[in-house]
Image (cartoon, grey):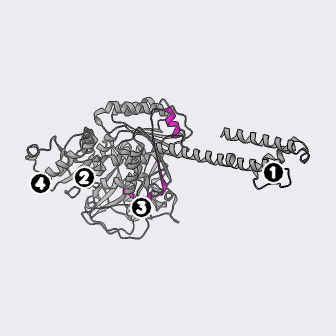
């Protein structure tokens, strides 16, 4: 570019000087010649004075042709070359991006695809940038395939940019505009649980670098950790020391999924409810300033208030804009019903096949549930899936209520879920004999279709759940405490007790009676809430195997009639 400019400056000066010297009477002085000859011929090629002498005529034609080639052509070539360079850098995944308010994902593992896919259902325009050491073209191929499978027509508001680089390079982080990111998600660089210590150390190093990068956004930073010690280290040493306790959120997938699996064993219907609640698709959780739950419920007909915690009210709705929609006149009365939890002693027998990092959290949650309820849960662990071991383990058990098959997470990614599928085939006769529910855990979503049609009651895809939780937190970090509370059974009472999601039998919840039909979702919600003095918030129900979470206009007239086999989805302590 500089060469083009210098050449054309010289062309201008030399041609103007020659014109002045060859026809001095035509120009008052050299300065006038500069503006009337060379520059005019260069900038306005259509200007040609046939009255000049031969030298001026030849010179003007020469300058016009030369400048068209050197100036106009040179500039066009330069712009084209610059554009080609930008495209080439983009294809190679290098060069500086110019983007802001984006979701930045560092590293790549099996959770990343599901994480990106869930943003398809976010009502906001979302820009996602991925930086990892993986081959750019391979990652792009996976993303395109996933989005295609989800429905290309839905991807208009989701933009995904993939960059190949070093997540420990400040230069590479700068190129993906880490300083302008609204949220940063640091994934474990591998799915291989055989290298837990090394993986967590890598994540910690990555986090230490990220918090030292200047940022104008104060982003939410979500960190995937394999060990409890890593979670505590992030909270106590990094988040506190950088005054980002509310902005740095360490996620331990094994703990969260272990607790969710435990709830699914005890209340099978909550799995389908959580699949919607932990996603942008359908009803989801929002926050608002702490306030009166009862007043909010009377005034708002497009959202359901759940409970207050630490100055925040948690609300269920299908859109953020619906949080502000109010009835013209607040509800002043409600239908009185008798509701409450079933208190008769219950015993449940569970067989667990397989073992992984989630098992201890499953057992812990079940023991806490026993303390919190009038129940006893017997757990039998079966470590192998060969026929002899299975038969010996279950032959003395008179009744089996649920069979849980865990996926081994201590193997290579290519072998994920193979043990689950084999065990699923082996226990079909046992499940039929005892009329037991089958619950399986899968790590790879691609294996979901393979496992169907084998009498499965619930399929829990761990990586998909964790990814959805991360997407929710990337948009609202204050939801973290809500997720932890909903998934954690406790034996506290009174104000210290936590809220969880339960699925109660209709007959049990309504104190042995099948209630008269309700005329709208809001009538059901308000009747149960105010009749129980705010103890029970109904958010939906399960009828004939179909789960419905209430959303939209709750006042829409409809008959909600329950059968004795139906379940009511309730948030309560």
307 vs 162, nearest the viewer: 162
Q: Nearer the viewer, mark 2 or mark 3?
A: 3
Helix or strand or loop: what does disc 1 sit on?
Answer: helix
Badge 2 local density, few (<14 within 10 Å), some, or many (20+)? few
Q: Which mark is residue 429?
A: 4
**For discs 4 and 1, the disc positioned in front in the rendered view:** 1
Residue behind mark 1? 57
Under circle 4, the secondary element is helix
- In what element is the residue under mark 3? loop
Please tell me whether residue 126 belongs to the stretch shown in magenta: no
Residue position marked by numbered label 2 in the rendering: 343
Marks 4/3: CA distance? 40 Å
Q: Is residue 154 left or right of residue 6?
A: left
Q: Position of residue 532 (x, y in %)?
A: 36, 56
> What's drawn in magenta, residue-wise?
149-176
Q: Looking at the image, do the residues carrying marks 4 and 2 touch, with CB atoms under 8 Å apart?
A: no
- Of circles 4 and 2, which is in front? 4
Query: What is the distance, in whole Å, between disc 2 and disc 3 at their CAs?
Result: 30 Å
Label 1 – label 3 distance at C-alpha: 81 Å
């Amino acid at each position: 570019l500089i060469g083009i400019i210098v050449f054309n400056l010289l062309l201008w000066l030399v041609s103007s000087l020659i014109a002045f010297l060859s026809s001095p009477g035509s120009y008052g002085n050299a300065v006038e010649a500069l503006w009337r000859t060379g520059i005019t011929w260069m900038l306005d090629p259509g200007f040609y004075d046939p009255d000049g002498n031969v030298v001026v005529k030849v010179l003007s034609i020469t300058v016009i042709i030369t400048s068209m080639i050197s100036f106009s052509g040179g500039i066009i070539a330069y712009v084209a070359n610059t554009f080609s360079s930008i495209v080439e850098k983009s294809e190679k995944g290098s060069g500086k991006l110019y983007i802001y308010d984006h979701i930045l994902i560092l590293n790549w593992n099996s959770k990343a695809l599901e994480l990106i896919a869930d943003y398809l259902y976010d009502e906001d325009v979302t820009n996602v940038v991925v930086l990892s050491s993986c081959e750019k073209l391979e990652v792009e191929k996976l993303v395109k395939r996933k989005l295609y499978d989800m429905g290309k027509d839905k991807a208009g508001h989701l933009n995904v940019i993939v960059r190949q680089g070093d997540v420990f390079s400040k230069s590479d982080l700068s190129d993906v505009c880490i300083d302008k990111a609204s949220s940063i998600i640091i994934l474990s660089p591998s799915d291989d649980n055989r290298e837990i210590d090394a993986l967590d150390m890598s994540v910690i190093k990555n986090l230490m670098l990220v918090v030292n990068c200047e940022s104008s956004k104060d982003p939410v930073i979500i960190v995937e950790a394999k060990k409890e010690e890593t979670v505590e280290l992030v909270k106590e040493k990094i988040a506190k020391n950088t005054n980002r306790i509310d902005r740095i959120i360490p996620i331990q997938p094994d703990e969260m999924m272990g607790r969710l699996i435990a709830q699914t064993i005890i209340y099978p219907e909550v799995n389908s409810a959580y699949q919607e609640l932990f996603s942008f698709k359908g009803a989801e959780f929002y926050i608002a300033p702490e306030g009166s739950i009862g007043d909010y419920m009377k005034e708002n007909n497009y959202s359901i208030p759940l409970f207050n915690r630490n100055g925040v009210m948690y609300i269920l709705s299908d859109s953020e804009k619906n949080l502000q929609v109010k009835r013209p006149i607040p509800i002043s009365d409600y239908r009185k019903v008798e509701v409450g939890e079933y208190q008769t002693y219950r015993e449940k027998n569970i067989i667990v096949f397989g073992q992984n990092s989630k098992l201890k959290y499953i057992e812990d949650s079940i023991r806490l549930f026993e303390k919190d309820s009038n129940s006893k849960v017997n757990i039998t662990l079966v470590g192998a899936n060969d026929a002899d071991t299975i038969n010996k383990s279950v032959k003395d058990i008179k009744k089996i209520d649920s069979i849980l098959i865990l996926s081994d997470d201590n193997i290579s990614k290519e072998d994920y879920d193979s043990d689950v599928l084999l065990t699923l085939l082996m226990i079909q006769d046992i499940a039929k004999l005892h009329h037991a529910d089958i619950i399986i855990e899968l790590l790879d979503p691609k294996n979901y279709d393979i496992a169907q049609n084998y009498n499965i009651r619930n399929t829990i895809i761990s990586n998909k759940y964790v990814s959805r939780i991360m997407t929710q937190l990337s948009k609202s970090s204050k939801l973290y405490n809500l997720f932890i509370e909903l998934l954690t059974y406790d034996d506290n009472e009174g104000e210290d007790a936590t809220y969880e999601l339960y699925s109660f039998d209709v007959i049990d919840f309504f104190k042995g009676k099948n209630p008269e039909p309700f005329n709208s979702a809001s009538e059901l919600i308000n009747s149960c809430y105010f009749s129980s003095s705010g103890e029970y918030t109904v958010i939906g129900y399960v009828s004939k195997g179909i789960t419905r979470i209430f959303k939209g206009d709750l006042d829409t007239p409809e008959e909600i009639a329950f059968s004795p086999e139906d379940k009511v989805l309730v948030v309560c302590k």
